[in-house]
Each structure stands twice: as C-alpha cells, then as structure tokens.
Amino acid sequence: MIKFNLIIADDVDIDIEEAIERKKEYGAYQSTIYELLKEINSCYTKLESSPKSGSNLSARVSRETNIKYLLVKDYVMIYEITGEEEVTIYRFLSARTNWINTV
C-alpha cells in the first residue's frame, strides 16, 4: 500500500490554532479540544493512506477543480492530491462559515 506524503500549508497551522482559541473563548472543555486534535490527526492518517476518500469540491462549485475536502467535526479540511504520492493540505476552516468562497 502506498503511503502518501502530506504537505501541510502554513495556513493550516494558523487555522487550527485559531479554532482552538475560539473553542477556549467559548468555554470548551479541554477534552473537547483534545478530541478535535485527535480527529485532525486521524484525518491526516486517512489522507496518507487513501486521499481519494474525500469529497470533490467541483461538485459544489461551478468549475472543475481537483481540490477535495474532508469534514472534521465542525470543520472542513481542504486538500489536493498534488503528486503521484503527495497530498497538499491547504486550509482547515469552520464548516459554519462560507468556506467555499475562502477556497
């Protein structure tokens, strides 16, 4: 089985930090934050082994694109298979926002 190399954009780290800060501001328990981080790591593992498992963004927009997304709790992980054994993760955005316009 091929293990894909993950390239994580700087914006993803910033997005995750902001998501954690928002959860803290809203009074989320530490266990809730831990569960989110655990789910993010689970998605990374999933993308390493089967990156085609995400949904195609082109089904939601009016133009063809290779960008895909995965739902992670209340968030959307935006990524693309960028090489034969490479996946680039571009963003980690709240699903409650108009994330399609951000992409």
Image: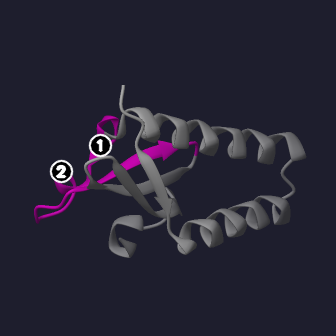
- Residue 7 within the segment the image draws in magenta: no
Amino acid on which the number 1 mark rests in the picture: Ser
In the image shown, does 42 or 32 lie closer to the viewer? 42
Please, is residue 91 above or below residue 86 in the view? below
Q: Residue at x 53, y 40 (%)?
A: 43
Quadrant (top left/top right/bottom left/bottom right) for the C terminus: bottom left
Residue 87 location in percent, x, y? 38, 53
Q: Residue at x 71, y 46 (%)?
A: 37
Residue identifier under label 2: 59
Q: Which residues are magenta?
A: 52-73
Q: Residue at x 56, y 73 (%)?
A: 10
Residue identifier under label 1: 55
Answer with the quarter of the image where residue 62 lies. Answer: bottom left
Please, is residue 83 above or below residue 29 in the view? below
Q: Is the Cβ of the residue at disc 1 closer than 8 Å to that at disc 2?
A: yes
- Of the residues tagged 1 and 2, which is closer to the observer? 1
Amino acid on which the number 2 mark rests in the picture: Ala
Residue 36 location in percent, x, y? 69, 44
